[in-house]
């Protein structure tokens, strides 16, 4: 699994109330890179909170509503009024420890997996053994099959509704069997599996493998893992917001 050479990355410094982080942006996710650089140069992130922090998972920021948010306010729905087309390059870029990735709304309302225009997360994650990774592979493939079946069923919605009205159980059963076979055939063309390199990274470095292939990873932490760990350890409320604000002081392109 090749990772872009760090000396070719655009580097961005994030000064926070918990310390300094330096991230590198990948060149082959240019829409995300260029948007992030623009927001940094505009000073957009200055003053925003890390509004969602989950230990052994990730830290998230970029909600413009967090800048002057009162204590205890639920955050995470703020945006800049646009989304970014997905640039998911998995398994080249994965949700390893230190990965920088774009947040987004769920598949139900965002099947194209477009990214938030401003919100991003940094993976902290944890390590996994091979048995756990194999189980996650199975779960991912089962979910993919369910998604395929649901999509195919939606294409036959009018027929299904007609057979239900007519109580045509034989027709419904035959269609279900047909869609099940189509689902299996489509899923078999591109089964989900972690590569040997992914498995090694998740065993040794850790991360959040269940996010792979679903979110755009567009950079990684180069310096400041101690800062990320300090943010991750913060006490949080029921909405995963740190009880004591952790704020971005400034950002700049180096």
Image (cartoon, rainbow, N blue to C red):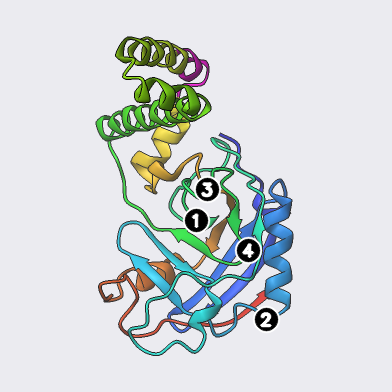
Could you tell which of marks 3 and 2 lies nearer the N-terminus?
A: 2
Picture disc at residue 117: 4
- Tell me the element at label 3: loop
- What residue range appears in magenta? 185-191
- Tell me the element at label 2: loop
Report the Cα–Cα distance between label 4 and label 2. 15 Å
The residue indicated by pointer 3 is: 215
Q: Is residue 213 above or below residue 240?
A: above
Tell me: 199 left or right of 83. Answer: left
Report the Cα–Cα distance between label 3 and label 2. 25 Å
- Residue 253 placement: quadrant: bottom right
Percent across and percent down for residue 176 are: 37, 16
The residue shown at (51%, 58%) is 103
Percent across and percent down for residue 26 are: 67, 51
Q: Is residue 97 above or below residue 14?
A: above
- Tell me the element at label 1: loop
Q: Is residue 39 above or below residue 10?
A: below
Q: Residues within 10 Å of mark 2 (few under 14, many from 20)?
A: few
Q: Nearer the viewer, mark 4 or mark 2?
A: 4
Q: Nearer the viewer, residue 224 or 128?
A: 128
The residue shown at (41%, 14%) is 175
* Majority secondary structure of magenta residues: helix
- Tell me the element at label 4: loop
């Amino acid at each position: 699994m090749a990772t872009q050479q760090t000396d070719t990355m655009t580097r961005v410094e994030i000064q926070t109330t918990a310390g300094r982080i330096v991230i590198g942006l990948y060149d082959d996710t240019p829409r995300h890179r260029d948007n992030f650089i623009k927001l940094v140069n505009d000073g957009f992130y200055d003053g925003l909170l890390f509004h969602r922090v989950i230990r052994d998972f990730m830290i998230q920021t970029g909600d413009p509503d967090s800048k002057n948010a009162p204590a205890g306010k639920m955050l995470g729905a703020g945006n800049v009024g646009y989304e970014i087309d997905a640039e998911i390059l998995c398994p080249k870029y994965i949700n390893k420890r230190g990965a920088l990735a774009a947040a987004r709304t769920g598949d139900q309302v965002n099947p194209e997996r477009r990214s938030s225009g401003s919100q991003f997360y940094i993976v902290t994650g944890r390590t996994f053994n091979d048995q756990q990774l194999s189980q996650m592979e199975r779960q991912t493939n089962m979910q993919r099959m369910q998604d395929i079946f649901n999509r195919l069923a939606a294409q036959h919605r009018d027929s299904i509704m007609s057979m239900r009205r007519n109580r045509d159980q034989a027709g419904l059963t035959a269609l279900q069997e047909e869609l099940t076979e189509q689902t299996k055939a489509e899923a078999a063309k591109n089964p989900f599996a972690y590569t040997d390199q992914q498995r090694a990274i998740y065993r040794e470095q850790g991360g959040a493998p269940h996010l792979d292939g679903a979110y755009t990873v567009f950079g990684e932490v180069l310096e400041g893992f101690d800062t990320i760990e300090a943010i991750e350890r913060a006490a949080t409320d029921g909405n995963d917001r740190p009880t004591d604000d952790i704020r971005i002081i400034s950002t700049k392109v180096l």
